[in-house]
Image (tube, rainbow, N blue to C red):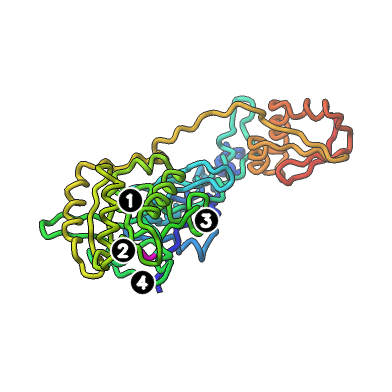
Amino acid sequence: MFMFYDQAKIYVKGGDGGAGAVAFRREKYVPEGGPSGGDGGRGGNIIFMGDEGLRTLVDFRYKRHYKGARGDHGQAKNMSGRSGEDTILRIPVGTVVLNDNTGETIADITEHGQHVVVAAGGRGGRGNARFMSNTNKAPTLAENGEPGEENWLRLELKLLADVGLVGFPNVGKSTIISQVSAARPKIADYHFTTLIPNLGVVELEDGQSFVMADIPGLIEGAHAGAGLGHEFLRHTERTRLLLHVLDISGSEERDPLEDLRIIQEEIRFYSPELAQRPMIIVANKMDIPSAEAHLQRLKEAVEDRHEIFPVSAATGEGLKALMYRIAQLLPDTPVPEILNPPADHLVTKAQLGKRFEILKEEDLFLVVGKEIEKHVKMTCFEREASVYRFQNILKVMGIDEALRAQGIKEGDKVEIAGVRFDWVEE
C-alpha cells in the first residue's frame, strides 16, 4: 500500500574531519629530519538532492538519523588523509527544509537534481608539518579533525501542481480527477474519503498537459488548524490556478453559496496572497434535479468575479470544456513566487556578539561558545605542545582574564564542551 507522508523530522550530522599526524622524516644520514605529518581528510557532507520521481517523505519516517563519513587521518611523508564520501539523500521536488530549532528556511528544493548541503563535513586537522616555523623547526603539535555540522531538520512537502482542487469534503473532487487523469483516488460517498493529496496529469487531445492536485476536503476553521487544515492548505500554496468545487445540488442539506463563502474565507485567513490566485468555480453534480436552481443563485451572487463551469463528475458532462479552458488560462497564469529563496541565494551574515559566556555552578565554571568549543574538540590533549597551544588560545580570546574576574581560585574546575580542567595559577 502506498503511504503519503508530507512532513518529517530528521537529525543530520556531517562527517568529522580526520586528525592530523605528527611524524618526522627518517632519512639515511639525516639524524633529525623535518616534520612530515600530513593533514586529516575532510568529513563527508550530508546533501539533499531533488528527485521529481519521488512523491512522499516516507523514507524519512523509518530512518531519522544520518551521519556523514569521517575523513581519514593524516599520515607520515606529508600524506593527507582521504576525505569522507558525501551522503546524498534524495527528496521530492517541492520540499522545504527548515531548521527545527529556529524555524529558519535552509533550502527550498524546487528543481530536479538541485543539490543543497544541509550539514557540512568538518575540515581535517592540520599535521605537524603545518606548524613548522623559524622558531620551531620540529613541532610535535597536530590537530584533531573539526566536528561536522549537526542539525535537527523539519521537512515539509508542498505539492508542485498547476491546478489545485479545493472544497468541502464529498463535493466530487476525487471523482473529477479520476475522470480527467490517470489518477485513481479512493472514492466513496462519505466525508474525508481523501486523506492524502492526489496528483494527476491531464493530457488533452492537442498535446497540452498539466498537473492537477486533488487537495483533501477543507472544513470550517481549517486556517486555524481545525481538522487537518494546515496540512491540507499547505499544498495549495504553489498551485497556479485554483478550482473551487461546489456541490451545486445542495445535497446533505448544505447551501452551495454558504460553502463558497466559508472556503474562500478559510483560504484568505490562511494566506491573503493565496486568496488572490486565479480561481474557477466548478458547479458539480449538475445531474441532480435541484442543481439548476442553486446554479442560478450562484451566478447572481458571483456576477463576473469568477468563471463558473457547471459539470457532472459522475457522467463526465462539462469536464472536457473545463479542462480546455484551464489549458487556455495556464500559459498566461504566472508561477507563484517562491517566498523561501533557494539555498543558492541565501546570504549568511556575520553575527557580531559574545565569543563566549561563563556560567558558574558552585566551584564549577562552565565556558560556552561555538568558537572555544570547536578548539577543545580539535585539541589533542595527549600532546604537551597541543595543551600549551590551547592555553595560549584561552589567553588570546580573553577567557583567562574573564575567569579571574568571575573569582576563580586555584583548584576550581573549568568545563568546556564536556571536558573538565583543574585551574592552576601560573
Taking 36 as reference, is 212 above or below it? below
For the residues bearing labels 1 and 3, Cβ distance under 8 angstroms: no
Residue tagged 4: 186
Instruction: Judge from the rendering whether residue 362 lies leftward or rightward of residue 62; answer left or right.
Output: right
Any part of residue 49 in sight = no
Q: Which residues are magenta?
A: 170-174
Taking 54 as reference, is 113 above or below it? above
User: Going 74% across and 37% down the picture, which residue do you hit?
Assistant: 367
Q: Is residue 383 magenta?
A: no
Provide the secondary structure element on which disc 4 rests: loop
Q: Is residue 172 magenta?
A: yes
Residue type of the residue flagged with mark 3: Ala
Provide the secondary structure element on which disc 2 rests: loop
Q: Disc 4 or 3, which lies upstream in sequence?
A: 4
Instruction: Judge from the rendering whether residue 257 lies leftward or rightward of residue 70; answer left or right.
Output: left
For mark 2, does the 10 Å Cα neighbourhood hold few (<14), some (14 to 19), or many (20 or more) residues?
many
Q: State the CA–CA distance, disc 4 to disc 3.
A: 23 Å
Task: State the residue in front, 115 or 97.
Answer: 97
Q: Disc 1 or 4, which lies upstream in sequence?
A: 1
Q: Which quadrant of the figure contains the N terminus?
A: bottom left
Write down the quadrant of residue 289 in the picture: bottom left
Q: State the CA–CA distance, disc 2 to disc 1.
A: 46 Å
Of tags 2 and 1, the one toward the viewer is 2
Residue type of the residue flagged with mark 4: Lys
Residue tagged 2: 249
* Labelled disc at residue 419: none
Provide the secondary structure element on which disc 3 rests: loop
Residue type of the residue flagged with mark 2: Ser
Q: State the CA–CA distance, disc 1 to disc 4.
A: 32 Å
Task: State the residue in front, 98 or 117.
Answer: 98
